[in-house]
Amino acid sequence: KRTKLSDNDYAKALGMAEAILNHPVAGPWFNPGLEGFREFNEVSIRTQHVNGLLLKGRLDRVHREGDHISILDLKTTADVPPRGFARQLVDRAYDLQVAWYLHLAEQAWPDCTVDFTFVCVENGGKPHGVQVYRATPSVVQSGRRKMHHALDLYAQCKATEYWPGYDPKIIDLEMPSWADFEVAEAVI
C-alpha cells in the first residue's frame, strides 16, 4: 500500500533533497549522474552469522571508491548539531545499526575497508541544514557489543524455546521527578 504525501510534505522532501545535493560533501555521493547510482541505493545484504542465524539488512546508499566502501545512512532529524544528534545516537541505538550494517558490508565485500557515515538533514522548515558524521571507533565498538549480545541471546532463546519477558512482579510506579502537575482551582 502506498501513502500519498500532502503537497506540503512533498515540498519539504524536495527541499531536503535539494539541501543534500547542494552540500559540498554529501552532494556528490547522492548525485543521480554517478555511474551505477541506482545499483548502490537501497542495497540489500543477506549473510549468515557464526552462530548460524541469517542476518539481513538494507543499506540506504553505498559509495565505493576502489577497495573502500562507505555506508551512507540518511537521517532526517529536527536536531542536526553534534550534541543533539549524539543524543539520538544513544536514544535510538544508532550505534547498533552502525555495527549491524558494518558487519553485513564486511561480509559482502571482504576485500574492502568499510566505514559508516550518517548524512543528517533537518526536517523542519527551510533552510534544511545538512551535517555529515562518520561513526568513530567508539561508536562501532559500542554497537558491536550490543549486536553480539543480542545475537547470542536470540540464538540461545531460539535453541531453548525460552523467551524471557519482563519481571513478573508488581512494581510500585512513582510520579517521575520531571513531571510537574498543578492543581487547578475549581471554579464554582
Image (tube, helix red, strand yellow):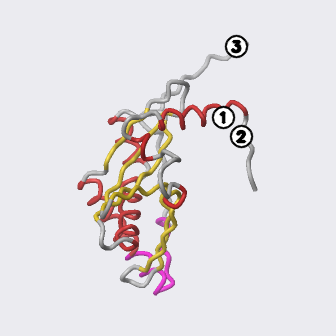
The percent position of residue 59, horizontal first and vertical second, equals 48, 59
Mark 3 lies on a secondary structure that is: loop
Q: Which label was assigned to residue 187?
A: 3
Task: Classify 10 Å Cα crowding around label 3: few (below 14), some (14-19), many (20 and above).
Answer: few
Quadrant assignment for the C terminus? top right
**Residues rendered magenta in the picture:** 152-167
Q: What is the count of numbered marks?
A: 3
Determine contact: label 2, label 3, CB under 8 Å.
no
Q: Which label was assigned to residue 5?
A: 2
Instruction: Identify the mark nearer the N-term, 1 or 3.
Output: 1
Q: Residue at x 53, y 47 (%)?
A: 32
Q: Nearer the viewer, residue 161 or 106?
A: 106
The percent position of residue 152, horizontal first and vertical second, equals 37, 76
Task: Classify 10 Å Cα crowding around label 2: few (below 14), some (14-19), many (20 and above).
Answer: few
The answer to which image quadrant residue 88 occupies is top left
The answer to which image quadrant residue 147 occupies is bottom left
Q: Is residue 109 magenta?
A: no
